[in-house]
Amino acid sequence: MGGKDRGRVLLDRVLAGIPAGESPVTHVAELPQRIPRTVDWPEWTPSELISALRVCGVDRPWVHQVAAANLAREGRHVVVATGTASGKSLAYQLPVLADLLADNKATALYLAPTKALGADQLRAAAGFGVPGVRPAPFDGDTPPAERDWARAHARWIFTNPDMLHRGILPSHGRWAGFFRRLRYVVVDECHAYRGVFGSHVALLLRRLRRVARRYGADPVFVLASATVAAPERSASVLAGVECQAVVDDGSPRGARTVALWEPPLLDELSGENGAPVRRSAGAEAARILADLVVEGARTLAFVRSRRGAEFTALGARRQLSEVDDELAGRVAAYRAGYLPEERRALESSLDDGALLGVATTNALELGVDIAGLDAVVIAGYPGTLASFWQQAGRAGRAGDGALVVFVARDDPLDTYLVHHPAAVLERPVEATVLDPGNPYVLTPQLACAAAELPVTDEDIDELGGSAAAETLEELAADGVVRRRRTGWYWVARDRPHASVDIRGSGGEQVAVVEADTGRMLGTVDPSSACATVHPGAVYLHQGASYVVDDLDLDTGLALVHAEDPEWTTSARDVVDIRVVRTLEERRYPGVSVCLGEVEVTTQVVGYLRRLPSGEILDHVPLDLPPQTLHTRAVWYTVSGPLLHDSAPGGAGLKPAHIPGALHAAEHAAIGLLPLFATCDRWDIGGVSTAAHTDTGEATVFVHDGHPGGAGFADRGFAAITPWLTATREAISFCECPAGCPSCVQSPKCGNGNEPLDKTGAVAVLDVVLRAITPAGA
Ligand SMILES: [Zn+2]
Ligand SMILES: [Zn+2]
């Protein structure tokens, strides 16, 4: 290595000129380099495959690649969960290609969460030039003639869950030859299958296995994942079969310096209810990016939105043009679609140094072959640790240090993370959350399964057990399936597949259409339509701004026109929550913690128009119908005496402060749940009240935002103590006087962030945590 590490040197340069007392860096960690460990090719590898791989630059495989390949080859389902750029692909390419070479009728199926990734993997598989494999795509972009060819001749099909669901399984008879010899199913980047989408994919994989069995095949599942907690458990829930995990990463990695960075508070600005405001993560990232480019460091900056990426690149270019116009020209925003050529061009210009700095959204996280950069700037926590490490993994070449800077955004989770380095640096990546038992997923999936093949008793066990049996009874009552001696048969006229959206959350989507041109811009979940596309709402689509003229919930249509006003809009709503059924309850003195089914009724009553400075122009009332959502929630109650008591052990709150204290505790809890479940704060919601009708006490609810739930509330219930501990810390560590977006304010609050009581929230969480934590723990 020699001399001072390159990552450290770059960090010193970025911090140059900032007085020591004002350093935004809250923590610096040095991650050591990892030495590569290779092994011989497994003895079963055909020699022509070894030569093909050598031609493509793979001389000797790494330990994890061979460990996973060996398991798959022995017929064991396996998940390989290792870091970015650790060559996970070879772990499945090896057994698949060896089998396809050994048996000229054998077939394999590859599934990717995105078309871009699928296209890359297809290119790689085709690039080996192994004779007779005939890899081919089969996705929404494949022309009909090529589809016919693929079905008849390809032995390795590259597709995605959407196409498997709509295009392959419903017409499995036409794929009989393919299914009969199906040896392997590869599920790539499987940590992407979470929440409602993940629950759908879990049932889709069970449908796939059932169809394969019908043709006499029992394929081995090979899953690839970013490093996640308990990979064998997540993979087994997803695939529906027992999976063995390979986690011992044998690939090399350069040393990295990781700096956690909190932008300073701005003196000249104030936000909602007079709260202090920090410099934005995007502006801070622009400055860091410019400094790194001046040092000649090849840098990627990850920003949360497209608009943000443009803004960051623009900011960096502006600062660089004061130094050197030539340098300014070597910074770009990556905002183009996902066309492979565009990504190739970007890869090569970063590789040869034509570009030095690129600001991008998470779009670049998957399916781009960029590694070994000098620096990565992550502006805003990307939602999961898996994504965080995926992005950070772009930095660092063996033998050469690199810098990773994580810049906190103004929200409770980011604030918590920059003040709790262990939560970023030492914590295992969060478990992937999905729930194949969700009735809103199970019902349409069972309908599809029955339409593909009659559902037998044996299938029922695999498809969800007693919940599946009950669901089939309901489908029978609706007249779409019928029970016969040999199983449940689909009897309705139309097949259900086309109306089942595996990425959505059920219900008819609301289409957002430009009135002048008739162009459809996108769709919105029916449950959130009132809040996001109400009349007057500013709607953003791929960086362009529109204003909504009309929302018709009956026809599922929102009409918009192009307009870029200087204000943004935020809906105001009234929310009511009812406990339908308590599923689990833990009682403690004065406190209870529950998990159950709830009905959330939301009525959007108006919206605020707000200028970028935070100034509010006006409040516009709206008359929209209430919407109900049946879902799952986790909640805790606190008794009156515990809240009021000012003696030690009580929260000592005056009655007037209780609603604000609970509301603040609710906001922060929503902000911190993503630390324990792979969700985003927009996937969940909350309600708090000083006296709830169903519980009779002060109650804070946090609920899933999707019909039937996606497992997030369940995770919150399971992790209640660490979750509420982190929530308390996030609030108490924030240096603001009375609440700000970094702690208790929420951008999606339907009540204008009022009332909020920051100190009261800490007092409430203290009494709850004292009650639920066993003494001495
Ligand atoms: Zn604060
Ligand atoms: Zn609120």
Image: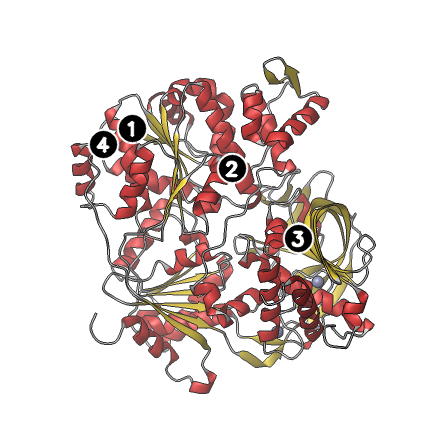
Q: Is mark 1 within 8 Å of ligand 2?
A: no
Return the x and y of residue 307 as percentages of the image width and height: 50, 60
Q: Visible in this render: residue 762?
A: yes
Q: Is residue 502 above or below residue 479?
A: below
Residue 612 in the image: x percent, y percent? 61, 69
Type of the residue with mark 3: Thr
Mark with earlier residue (1, 2): 1
Identified at 25% across, 31% down, the residue is 98
User: Which residue bears the numbered disc 2?
Assistant: 201
Q: CA distance from mark 4 to mark 1?
A: 8 Å
- Residue at numbered disc 1: 134
Label 4 environment density (alpha carbons within 10 Å; few <14, some 14–19, many ≥20): some
Report whether 271 appears left or right of 352: right
**Mark 1 touches mark 2? (CB < 8 Å):** no
Q: Counting residues from the N terminus, which is met first, the one under dot 1 or under dot 3?
A: 1
Q: Earlier in the sequence, mark 4 or mark 2?
A: 4
Q: Which mark is residue 130?
A: 4
Q: Please state which of residues 317 and 191 is positioned toward the viewer in this rendering.
A: 191
Above or below residue 164? Residue 284 is below
Beta carbon at label 2 within 8 Å of ligand 2: no
Q: Are marks 4 and 3 in contact (CB under 8 Å)?
A: no
> In screen coordinates, is 689 left or right of 503?
right
Give the Cα distance between marks 1 and 3.
46 Å
Q: Secondary structure at mark 2?
A: helix
Name the mark on residue 550: none
Q: CA distance from mark 2 to mark 3?
A: 27 Å
User: Mark 2 or 3 closer to N-term?
Assistant: 2
Q: Amino acid at mark 2?
A: Val
Residue for badge 3: 532
In this view of the protein, which residue sits in the foreground, 16 or 346? 16
Q: Nearer the viewer, mark 2 or mark 3?
A: 2
